[in-house]
Amino acid sequence: MSQANGWSRRAFLRGSGLAVALPFLSSFRGASSALGAEASGSVAVTATGAPLRMAFMSIPNGVQQEAWFPGEDFSLNETMKPLEELKPHFQVISGLDHINATAGPDGAGDHARASATFLTGQRARKTAGSDIQCGISIDQVAAQRVGKLTRLPSLELTSDLIRNSGSCDSGYACAYQYNLAWSSPTTPVTPESNPRLVFEQLFGAGSQAERKKNFASRLAMKKSVLDFVLEEGKDVQRQLGATDRRKFDEYFTVVRELEQRIENAERFDELPETEVDAPAGIPRDFGEYMALMYDMLVLAFQTDSTRVATLLLAYDGSNRTFPQIGIPEGHHWLTHSQREEELAKKVARIDQFYIEHFSRFLQKLEQTEDVDGNSLLHNSMIVYGGAIADGNRHTHENLPVILAGHGGGAIQTSRYYQAEKQPMSNMFVSMLNLMGVPTNEFGDSTGELKL
């Protein structure tokens, strides 16, 4: 790295077994004649040449219907009020279905089917054994094409448990319920649940064993990941222009703050508010847990460590309680008790709690400048929702779907898009084509959804 304009666009600060990914800076433009010019041409880039990204967030148990959908003038209902300031940057879509999540001849098991179908559009084979089968998920279809452009082909996260064995929902294997990503019809991609391990994956060099060894060394020396590369970082800073130095400083401030939050979580002796024991490094507060995972995703996109990601916020069927917002009852139980007005309000408040953290994530994407001068949110496609609509009746039609981001300018926003009844897979076909992954079909699609 003798000169800033000679850096690779995947440049790293290296030191003591670490690889600290850098954010996109204008200084990287000299690395190629055209920003984003890569062996695969225009795959996964916007019209300005900036990276195009996609991510998917899954919520459990459907939503409280009366509080979810906006008015026809895009006036936000109760659940989405935290998104008010972000209205120019997202759209709410109704009329999308996942028919393969319905019971059909398979009977009970809607939560497992919903999770398995959400990003695949395919019906899960009903089995509690190892002979699981579903379909390849949209994120993995994209990763197979664009993953070679980044250090991590894709990033799979969860702010819940990991279970890949046993039976969990009416004869369906747990693997269906606790995984969103599928690299093949028989292979779910297990998400990472521990923020510390995600951080080490993003900012630690070498194999998993090497990263573990480096972390133990830093822990013994009571040094952060940034302390090991501080001197080289100062050398890089001296070669940057004023604007890039400011962005560089802001970025490292965020990384250090994130590491400190993880360290604080690791100090707690008490278990987090989950239904079983959780690994060290997981915050006690579920809201902070989600926030950490969302922040990891922002950094992964900011550094172009990956362009494809999934975040399972809670497994479908979760009966988590929410004492931080005054709700001691389990979420799943409440969804089946919505005939009582006060309990229905609690379901809506839980939905809003999830939206509050999604809003914070979108705000960070919007506030983070991308290499082309637009925001990360402008150059992204972010899907938030699930494959259950009404949590009481376990319906899979007219699903709760938010599509945030402008797709680099290719997607309409600031609207309530009342699509005609059609498979959710149609939206995925459109997203793949925008991502530079040409396709005419995906899952149970019947065409494209005009975005």
Image (cartoon, rainbow, N blue to C red):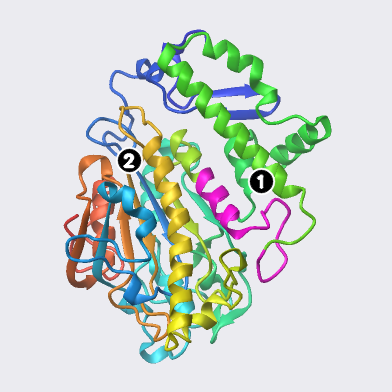
Above or below: residue 350 compared with residue 74: below
Residue where numbered disc 2 is placed: 52
Marks 1/2: CA distance?
Answer: 27 Å
Q: Nearer the viewer, residue 198 or 322?
A: 322
Type of residue at label 2?
A: Leu
Residue 343 belongs to magenta span: no
Residue lying at the far right of the rendered structure: 220
Q: What residue type is disc 1 on?
A: Arg
Which comes before the other along the chain, label 1 or label 2?
2
Picture coordinates of residue 57, whole percent (x, y): 43, 58
Q: Residue at x 34, y 72 (%)?
A: 67
Horizontally, is 315 left or right of 90 in the view? right
* Quadrant of the rendered image containing residue 161: bottom right
Whether residue 185 is visible, yes or no, is no
Question: Which of the 4 image quarters holds residue 63?
Answer: bottom left
Mark 1: give few (<14), some (14-19) or many (20+) Cα within 10 Å: many
Q: Which mark is residue 196?
A: 1
- Magenta residues, as a range? 273-296
In the figure, is residue 160 to the left or right of 376? Answer: right
Residue at the spot 38% in from the left edge and 78% down from the top edge: 101
Q: Position of residue 274 (x, y in %)?
A: 65, 67
Residue 234 in view, yes or no: yes
> In the picture provided, is 334 more to the left or to the right than 16?
left
Q: Residue at x 44, y 80 (%)?
A: 344
Residue 365, percent from left and from top? 40, 41
